Image: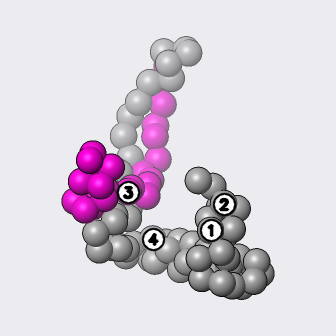
Amino acid sequence: MNKLELIETLKEDARLTKSEAKAVVKLFFNELSKALIKGERVEIRGLCSFFVKEYKAYSGRNPKTGRPVQVKPKKLPFFKCGKELRERVDS
């Protein structure tokens, strides 16, 4: 399912106009992004959680040239599946 399909499903199930459904989906993803940018954890009970992992700088190696390179510190978003979702998918 992609974003457009999600909007279409929300429109039909919640009896919203397409622009209203689009606004709801946009709001959800914007708020999720804002929370992750702040370093907050986002938990949707029974479904999943999103959080940010921080990585320190380290010395790596360019796989093409073999030369050492310095990798900058970074933050990456992660998704963790909830127990209920895992059980639904596995059944």
Tag 1 residue: 9
Tag 2 residue: 5
Indicate yes or no whether the magenta region holds residue 26: no
- Distance between mark 1 and mark 3 Cα atoms: 23 Å
Tag 4 residue: 36
For label 3, the crowd category at 10 Å Cα-Cα, with few meaning under 14, some 14 to 19 and many 20 or more, is: few
Secondary structure, mark 3, is: strand
Q: Which mark is residue 79?
A: 3
Q: Nearer the viewer, residue 27 or 10?
A: 10
Secondary structure, mark 4, is: helix
- Distance between mark 3 and mark 4 Cα atoms: 11 Å
Which dot, 1 or 3, sits closer to the camera? 1
Q: Which sits earlier in the primary sequence, circle 4 or circle 2?
A: 2
Amino acid type, residue under disc 3 in the picture: Phe
Amino acid type, residue under disc 1 in the picture: Thr
Label 3 close to label 4 by CB (< 8 Å): no
Which dot, 1 or 4, sits closer to the camera? 1
Task: Name the residue rendered at 66%, 60% in the picture.
Answer: 5
- Distance between mark 2 and mark 3 Cα atoms: 21 Å
Q: Which sits earlier in the primary sequence, circle 1 or circle 4?
A: 1
Which dot, 3 or 4, sits closer to the camera? 3
Q: List x then y, in percent, for residue 65.
A: 55, 14
Q: Which sits earlier in the primary sequence, circle 1 or circle 3?
A: 1
Q: List x then y, in percent, for residue 31.
A: 53, 80
Secondary structure, mark 2, is: helix
Please give the range of residues in magenta: 67-91
Task: Name the residue rendered at 43%, 58% in the picture.
Answer: 77
Residue 25 visible from this viewpoint: no
Amino acid type, residue under disc 4 in the picture: Leu
Q: Nearer the viewer, residue 64 or 19?
A: 19
Q: Which mark is residue 1?
A: none
